[in-house]
Image: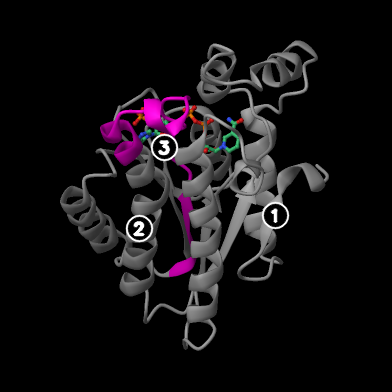
Amino acid sequence: MKTKVVIITGGSKGIGKALVAEYLKNNYLVYSLSRTKVNLHKEVKQVVLDITDTNLLQKKMDVIFTEIQQFSLESITLINNAGRLGTIANIENIAVQDIQKSVALNILAPMQLSAIFIKKLQNESAQKTIINITSGAASTAYAGWTPYCSSKAALEMLTKTISLEQQTENNPVKIVAIRPGVVATAMQEQIRNTSKNNFSKVDKFIDLYKTNTLSTTRNVATKIYKIDAANKLKSGDIIDLRNILN
Ligand SMILES: NC(=O)c1ccc[n+]([C@@H]2O[C@H](COP(=O)([O-])OP(=O)(O)OC[C@H]3O[C@@H](n4cnc5c(N)ncnc54)[C@H](OP(=O)(O)O)[C@@H]3O)[C@@H](O)[C@H]2O)c1
């Protein structure tokens, strides 16, 4: 019997939590990485850490891969989902420590995790996929969101460069980026609660909420899972979930 594995960052809340439930329902061995331990199904392997701590992340991933290597794998997926907007304001009004946190979480951690994933699985012939959860903000600029927009743009470029690097490998990893659309999570609450002074487009997001236009985390997670399981995307693809039917 072969094992299907998924490693999800930010599995404690929002989209990540729904992804954990979706993959578990489909009989995956699920690892969830987040700073807080929450009430997830007992079969989920919760790994509690700040993934921007590069030394600790390497150590925890070493442990995870030692466990995984006991199994004969059918497939393995890394979902770089954890992300933060950070303070919403013009860049000169954001503390550098806050900028550093956003850059570390939104781009450095996915880069380090992708590198570890590729290296550890170099001789593994099972289906290997990295899914980066990006945002429309990677290509649409919003005043007040400089750390977020720029780090998501970098995440999409990482998707393209790694896909090129993998083309010449013997057991290549497929890598794609998915824009989930506007989803009902704490991140959207943060946006709606920002003053117009710091975020001039706040009314657009309040309207989306009032008109019930937000996707549910469950719907988003189901679509992402189906994309992964179908394995039909081309490596390097950047897709907007709003263009994918249920
Ligand atoms: N919601 C939207 O409308 C929307 C739209 C476009 C893109 N996205 C993207 O979708 C992804 C998920 O967003 P969401 O809305 O579900 O966010 P969320 O509800 O705020 O959840 C963020 C998750 O990231 C984890 N996390 C934050 N900092 C971490 C750290 N330093 N180390 C480990 N885990 C950390 C959090 O867990 P802990 O607090 O327990 O650490 C939490 O599980 C993000 O990449 C976001 O940019 C969201």
Q: Is residue 218 magenta?
A: no
Q: Quadrant of residue 78?
A: bottom left
Secondary structure type for disc 3: loop
Residue on which the image places disc 1 = 239
Q: CA distance from mark 1 to mark 2?
A: 21 Å
Residue on which the image places disc 3 = 10
Residue at image location 54% in from the left, 45% down from the top: 23
Q: Nearer the viewer, residue 24 or 120?
A: 120
Q: Is residue 87 magenta?
A: yes
Q: CA distance from mark 3 to mark 2?
A: 13 Å
Residue on which the image places disc 2 = 113
Q: Nearer the viewer, residue 128 or 90?
A: 90
> Residue 130: image x %, image y %?
50, 61
Name the image quarter holding the C terminus: top right
Beta carbon at label 3 within 8 Å of ligand 1: yes
Q: Nearer the viewer, mark 3 or mark 1?
A: 1
The reply to whether dot 1 and dot 2 touch (C-beta < 8 Å) is no
The reply to whether dot 3 and dot 1 touch (C-beta < 8 Å) is no
Which amino acid does the dot numbered 2 rest on?
Leu
Figure coloring: one colour
Left or right: where 182 falls relative to 193: right
The reply to whether dot 3 and dot 2 touch (C-beta < 8 Å) is no
> Residue 77: image x %, image y %?
49, 58
As drawn, the residue found furthest toward the front would be 92
Q: Earlier in the sequence, mark 1 or mark 2?
A: 2
Please give the range of residues in magenta: 73-101
